[in-house]
Amino acid sequence: MKNLHFIKLAFAGFILILSGIYSIGYSQKKPVTPPPSAGDKIGYNYPEGKSFKYLSDTKIVQTMDVNGQSMLVNISMYMGCEVKSTGKQGENLKLEIKIDTMAQNIESPQGVAGGPITDVNGKVFNMIISPSGKAIDVTEASKIVYSVEGGGENNLGESFLSYFPYLATSAVKPGDTWVSNDTIDNKSPNNTVWMPVESKFKYEGIENVDGIDCAKISATLSGTRKMTTQSQGMEIRTSGPFTGTKITLIAVKEGYLVKESVTTKMTGNIEIPDQNMTFPVVMDITSVNQIVKK
């Protein structure tokens, strides 16, 4: 019974952490620069006044072993939004974002939780990004706060800080490769995430997707994820190495995101120091964000 009680605490804490993972995403915090070359200059340049509709879908499967007993958590999260350019601020883009829908569903030994997050439906905010996708200003998004059943409080600023995949800041030609090293460091009242990431990029060239000429950029990801959360007065730590892959498709002519898909796997441990408990955990995350027809 004692183990079952702490397992439930661990699940509660883990769900809080996963909400943080979803908000952070896997983009880098600063632009990456490949070696100089004569090639394609790929960047964001959303046509002013034209609206683009996106749907992101993230699925997380987490398995942990407690004294030989396997425990499973399935989390699915999706968000639909519309992106529209309202002009430029110097070289940067001013974007208007409207949230159409958001939901999070959690299945665990504790039961089923979550559902639609109606607090954000119809919310509109403005943000500024650089041509390479770096978020310059997400102040308005950060002011929109919402709660997730079983997952604590978040704000839209966390979700859009790395919504647009970051691109190379110089021209690239097919076959060019480059490496970026960065550290994601996110803190909130309930949890912290520290994640050094190495991304090895390759420009694959032009690929036609549904009649759109897209620049295709692949990446292999590796690093270490360290997460800490507070649940019912207890500190819960989750850590371990992870690896993954990412594919990004950008419309070459008009400069907008067509699709990003990310897959990662972490194998590590969950630790509850106060109770001197440690057990192994495996976490698989798949995430797709793509443009959809209206």
Image (cartoon, grey):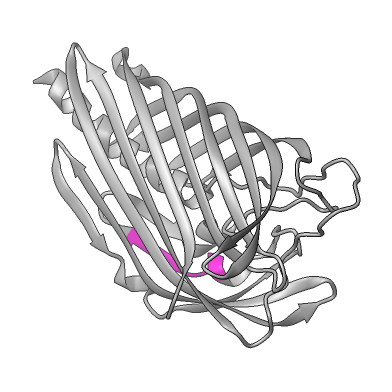
In the image, residue 71 lies at what x, y percent? Answer: 20, 27
**292 and 184: which one is in front?**
292
**89 and 149: which one is in front?**
89
Question: Relative to 276, does residue 191 appear above or below in the rendering?
Answer: below
Side of 95 where 285 appears, left or right = left
Segment tinted magenta in the rendering? 141-147
**The C terminus, quarter of image:** bottom left
Quarter of the image for residue 64 reads: top left
Q: Residue furthest left?
A: 1
Quarter of the image for residue 223 reads: top right
Task: Report the residue at 27% width, 38% height from top.
Answer: 12
Side of 245 where 176 appears, left or right = right
In the image, residue 59 lies at what x, y percent? Answer: 34, 46
Question: Relative to 122, does residue 216 appear above or below in the rendering?
Answer: above
Task: Report the residue at 19% width, 11% height from top.
Answer: 67
**The N terminus, quarter of image:** top left
Side of 69 where 161 appears, left or right = right
**108 and 180: which one is in front?**
180
In the image, residue 233 lies at what x, y percent? Answer: 32, 34
| 126 in magenta | no
Question: Relative to 128, does residue 196 appear above or below in the rendering?
Answer: above
Number of marks in picture:
0
Question: Relative to 223, does residue 245 appear above or below in the rendering?
Answer: below
